[in-house]
């Protein structure tokens, strides 16, 4: 199980006692402010503990949804525009406006870890919106996999989500041409 420094202060009552528990291998320090009671922890568990309100998006979401086999160079996290800046070179923070932030959010279990991630319908819209920024080969691979899933996608959700986006009609045309 993972713990924040604050949670451990409630249990151990002082920084000295926390450091003592670490030296005695009762708990293990993963990174600044994050501790665990087991030696090996999945990196997504740490991510979820450290940024509980963040939502996995972008290249990471395509990878976790098995729409590409390209492992992203960073973990792409969507946060609310008002959220504190994430200062971590392994994470690419994407600021999202309030009206779009929760749109399409779901929780899935990936390798035993429950994560917040945008659903496939929302990610298809983002793919159409950002098609020039993702790279041609990756775009074609993801679109090809979306075509295979076309019958299982919820088109009603896609149409509902598009109402919140500027140029929703244009995005819908791109999706119709590329996937359906």
Image (cartoon, grey):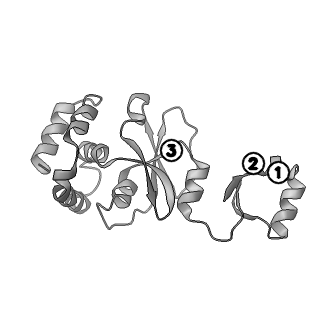
Mark 1 Cα shell of 10 Å, populated few (<14), some (14-19), many (≥20): few
Residue 7: image tag: 2
Q: Residues within 10 Å of mark 3 (few under 14, many from 20)?
A: many
Name the mark nearer the viewer: 3 or 2: 2
Disc 2 secondary structure class: helix
Q: Is residue 55 left or right of residue 152?
A: right
Q: Which of the labelled discs sits on residue 46, or is there none? A: none
Residue 104 in the image: above or below residue 145: above
Local SS, label 1: helix
Q: Which residue is mark 3?
A: 54
Q: Residue drawn at (16%, 32%), measured in percent from left and top?
A: 169
Residue 127, percent across and down? Answer: 26, 48
The residue lying toward the viewer, choosing from 153 and 174, is 153
Secondary structure of residue under mark 3: loop
Work out whether 123 lies above or below 63: above
Where does the image place residue 86, in percent across and percent down from the top left?
Answer: 56, 46
Q: Quadrant of residue 130?
A: top left
| Quadrant where the image shows the N terminus | bottom right
- Upstream in the sequence, badge 3 or badge 2? 2
Residues marked 1 and 2 touching at CB (< 8 Å): yes
Residue at left 12%, top 44%?
176
Picture disc at residue 11: 1
């Amino acid at each position: 199980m993972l713990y924040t420094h604050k949670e451990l202060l409630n249990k151990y009552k002082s920084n000295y006692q926390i450091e003592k528990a670490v030296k005695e291998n009762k708990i293990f320090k993963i990174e600044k402010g994050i501790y665990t009671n087991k030696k090996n922890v999945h990196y997504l568990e740490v991510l979820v503990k450290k940024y509980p309100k963040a939502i996995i998006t972008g290249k990471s979401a395509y990878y976790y949804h098995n729409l590409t086999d390209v492992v992203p160079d960073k973990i792409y996290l969507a946060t609310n525009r008002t959220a504190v800046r994430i200062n971590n070179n392994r994470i690419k923070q994407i600021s999202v406006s309030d009206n779009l932030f929760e749109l399409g959010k779901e929780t899935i279990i990936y390798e035993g870890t429950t994560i917040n991630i945008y659903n496939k319908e929302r990610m298809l819209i983002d793919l159409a919106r950002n098609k020039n920024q993702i790279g041609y080969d990756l775009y074609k691979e993801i679109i090809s996999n979306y075509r295979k899933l076309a019958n299982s996608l919820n088109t009603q959700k896609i149409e509902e989500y598009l109402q919140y986006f500027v140029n929703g009609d244009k995005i819908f045309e791109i999706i119709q041409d590329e996937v359906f």
